[in-house]
Image: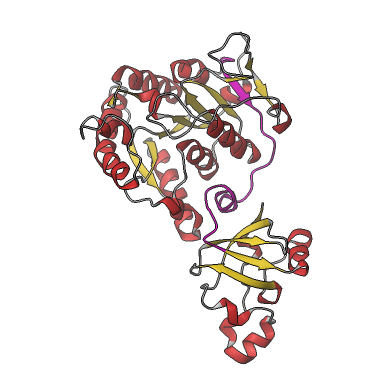
Amino acid sequence: MKQRAEVVKAGRIVVKVGSSSLTQRGRIDLERLRLLVDAIAARRVEGSEVVLVSSGAIAAGLAPMGLRSRPRDLATQQAAASVGQGLLMARYSDAFAAHGLRVGQVLLTVDDVTRRSHYRNAYRTFARLLELGVVPIVNENDTVATTEIRFGDNDRLAALTSHLVHTDLLVLLSDVDGLYDGDPRKPGTTMITDVRGPVDLEPLKIGRTGSSGVGTGGMQTKVEAAGIATEAGIPVVLTSAARVGEALRGDPVGTLFHPTGRRRKTRLLWLAHATSGQGRLILDEGAVRALTDRRSSLLPAGITAVEGNFSAGDPVDLLSPAGVVIARGLVNYDATELPDLLGRSTRDLARDLGPTYEREVVHRDDLVLL
């Protein structure tokens, strides 16, 4: 059996496991958890560094709180996560300790990794944990994240974490053993062993939801996460949690998504895929051309309208005159400041209002085309 070179040579790996692969009836399945930990520990013995992105906090908190299914409202989800996160980490700590390994908890929000000072600190934390031989266990900070600043699902979080920690490989574990050209529960469907780009996905019918009732993502979110990672030059293996040992050994199980792009600045990848615009700036045609053709910064002179309530440092969407979102960027002004600046040059603004107004509305280094 020929092993996958992309997997065998990977020195740093991110593994993502979902709620449905770790829990049963609102409780952590210790046998499934040990299977996962044993496979990661075996890869660590070979010299690789591993970061684990683990769902399951909310699901693990259901039974202790007397809940039969995942709550719909955010406050109860956060309460369940608060109870379940400690239980989940305790189980991981015990399982990794059997292999002589320590674990460290890393809880992230979108805000942690889109603001410049925060994402640099996040990278330093990961780097130091790995240097010390610790297995970082990552989850979204469900107990404090609001609807507006959520990653949405841990598949996306795993893809973005892969880029943040400069990983060589992302392994997405599901309750399905790979990507199929239809519903894998129906006869006549075939597993897709390799995906080399979006064209390979066009004829497929990809499910949007899982069947367990405890997770937030289905195959759709995993394919989207694979797209984020491969766009940044990171290969992805998608398979079932039951086959994690084979996947990490490099056996040709599941589906391999081949890289389609090159690595780019971490913060821009997060900006494109982990944020939503807190406001909208409508641009004139000249500004659209400056952004898309010349990769220029956005100046007040090119803005015709401001929508939404946002603060300096927030992500905002940049729209063409026809209302098409063309880019997203971190804005340098509050929403209340901008209306008086529209259509004016930075030179005029500096003369009339002072030198602090001689700055871009969105700097090109803080802007990503969509």
Q: Does the rendering let one see residue 234?
A: yes
Residue sitting farthest toward the bottom = 352
Please tell me which residue lies in front, 65 or 102. 65
Q: Residue 6's spot in the image, x, y percent?
A: 61, 25
Q: Is residue 318 above or below residue 301?
A: above
In reply to whether residue 257 is colored magenta, the answer given is: yes
Q: Does the rendering let one see residue 121?
A: no
The residue that appears at 68% across and 42% down in the rendered structure is 262
Which image quadrant for residue 183?
A: top right
Q: Residue 52's spot in the image, x, y percent?
A: 42, 33
Q: Residue 343's spot in the image, x, y percent?
A: 69, 79
Q: Residue 267's spot in the image, x, y percent?
A: 56, 53
The residue that appears at 45% across and 54% down in the rendered structure is 148
Which image quadrant for residue 213?
A: top left
* Magenta residues (range): 251-279
Left/right of residue 115 with respect to residue 199 in the rendered view: left
In reply to whether residue 275 is colored magenta, the answer given is: yes
Q: How is the image coloured?
A: secondary structure
Q: Quadrant of the N terminus?
A: top right
The residue that appears at 49% across and 59% down in the rendered structure is 115
Left/right of residue 362 with respect to residue 48 in the rendered view: right
